[in-house]
Amino acid sequence: VTGSSSQPYNLPIIKATPTLRGPYYTIGHLPGPMGPYTFTFNANAPHSELHFARDEEKVSALHPAGFTVGANTTDCIVVFPEGSGLEPLYFSMTVILPEGPLKQRQEEENQARAKADAEAKAKAEAEAKAKAEAEAKAKAEREALFARAGVVPAPTYTPEMVKSAETALGAAGVMVLGQTPGAMQLSVAGGGVLTATGEILSSLGAAVGRAIASLGATATAGTAGPMVAAASAILFPPAAGEGSDRVPGRDLNAMFALNAQLLAGQDVKIEPGATSVNLPERGHLVNSNGQMALQLLKTGDTLPAAVPVLNAVRDAATGLDRITVPAVAGAPERTILVNPAPSPAAPSDTASPPPSVPVTPVHTGTEIKPVETITVTTTPAADIGGLQDFIYWRPDAAGTGVEPIYVILSSPYGETNAKGKYSGRDYNSDKAGGPIQDLDWKTATIDREGVDKVKLHTGRFGESPENVVMIDRLEKILKGELQPTDTDKRFYTHEVRELERYRALGIADGTVPENDYEVWNNTHTATLEDYKLSSDETLLYTPEALNSQN
């Protein structure tokens, strides 16, 4: 039995002619080599049941049929005259070839097979070449895209790198982001990352969409003074059963990241290589009823639309990426750590565990919930302050492209309840280490004890070029090598008084609290108010000190 793949095979139809001998019929003019012959057969002869092996295991000598199979076979369909009551028959006859024709057939078979093998080889080589060229082109395009976006693939980690990276990711006060394409992430200073995927991600995206639509339908023209339309889209309440004494955005620095295209919409195409992107909405993390909320703000005349695009810098020792976020009004420069390694999958074979990569700490104790009913309010533009937000690029889920991520940082100074009369800074007067006093820097006398206090207090923040210059001036003043200026006196009295406020808050000398930005802002602002100073840094630092950081 032979087959010709799955293609239909057309057979000639031969009409059987009845003879005078009862049930005998004659057929002739058959196709192929049997054409000259005529055959007579009994149509009513008993038919034995045919059995064909269907199970391949029961078939013996199964092999490819070859290219010339059937060349010496004649087959056709035999039909009988109408009214005979006989069904059509399949008729097949094979001619046994003598040595000469058999040899010729084998040669034809060999030639056909050689041709087919050559064609198959050429086709395979062409397909392999095309595949290699396509892969090379895709790789080059991917590398060019990653280069424009400032994305560097995750490195191959050594055990030492993993250890160093996980130490850095778990350090106190650090804010990190993980590598989870398409997800939204809440990062809490020193508390890891909460990642939203699946159904919760869809519901959060829908809430953002509702807030954007509501803002788009709100006009602020005609209001008294510059106003900004605002709408809360996502809430971050404490998890059920958890205490609320340490709330992200109020007591702890927090950061939220989502796909920037959600805010950009269809009208703004974010392209790799851009240094800034104009968004129709920007984000703001605010405190509302004891919990943090993502508030979207409508950009326009009263709120700039431009959001900076920042590139990460790879740290060779840890394999982590560092993004430096510039200072803005009301918030200092900050550094964000990004773990470029994808989350390790559960090993399918315990004997072959996956390669070790640094794992991003997971945040617990906070939930992420969408706002179902969007309410738009108008807020004075002056109350918004500086927004500390940015966009960076990371690989997409396929790993062949990139996606823009919009990141919003909470105010590092926590919840405030007052604005300084002289400094103009927002701060919390209940957490400043005591009430404002009426002090005068002009009457100060610089002495050894005071300079040691200045060195003790500034030392907790790490060495800074500006403080080094100013402390060096104080040492020279003690030695009589330099006459104190008003700037020296203001710096000296400010640092000593700020130390007193830290001690009043119960913060040990030489230590940095977990909410260091908040504590510093409250004590620093209160000290400026003590001495009736503005927040102009030239009042505390000489030009030489300010230029020392360049």
Image (cartoon, rainbow, N blue to C red):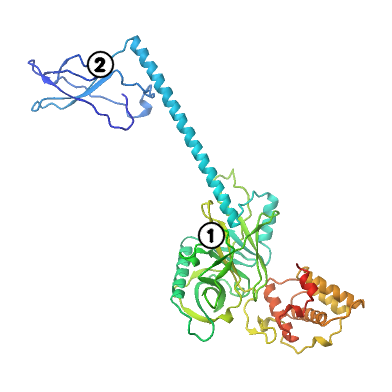
Q: Is residue 224 above or below residue 161?
A: below
x, y percent for residue 186: 57, 66
- In space, the residues marked 1 and 2 are separated at their CA atoms by 73 Å
The residue singled out by tag 1 in the image is 271
The residue singled out by tag 2 in the image is 33
Count residues near mark 2 (Cα–Cα under 10 Å), then give few for <14, some for 14-19, many for 20+: some
Q: The N terminus lies in which quarter of the figure? A: top left
x, y percent for residue 204: 48, 67
Residue 434's disc number? none
x, y percent for residue 450: 85, 79
Q: Is residue 497 left or right of residue 419?
A: right
Say which residue appears at 39% left-offset and 22% top-offset: 112
Give whichever of discs 1 and 2 has the lower sequence position: 2
Count residues near mark 1 (Cα–Cα under 10 Å), then give few for <14, some for 14-19, many for 20+: some
> Extreme bottom residue here?
438
x, y percent for residue 383: 58, 81
Say which residue appears at 28% left-offset and 32% top-offset: 8
Q: Quadrant of residue 272?
A: bottom right
Three-letter code for the amino acid on which mark 2 is drawn:
Pro
Q: Secondary structure at mark 1?
A: loop
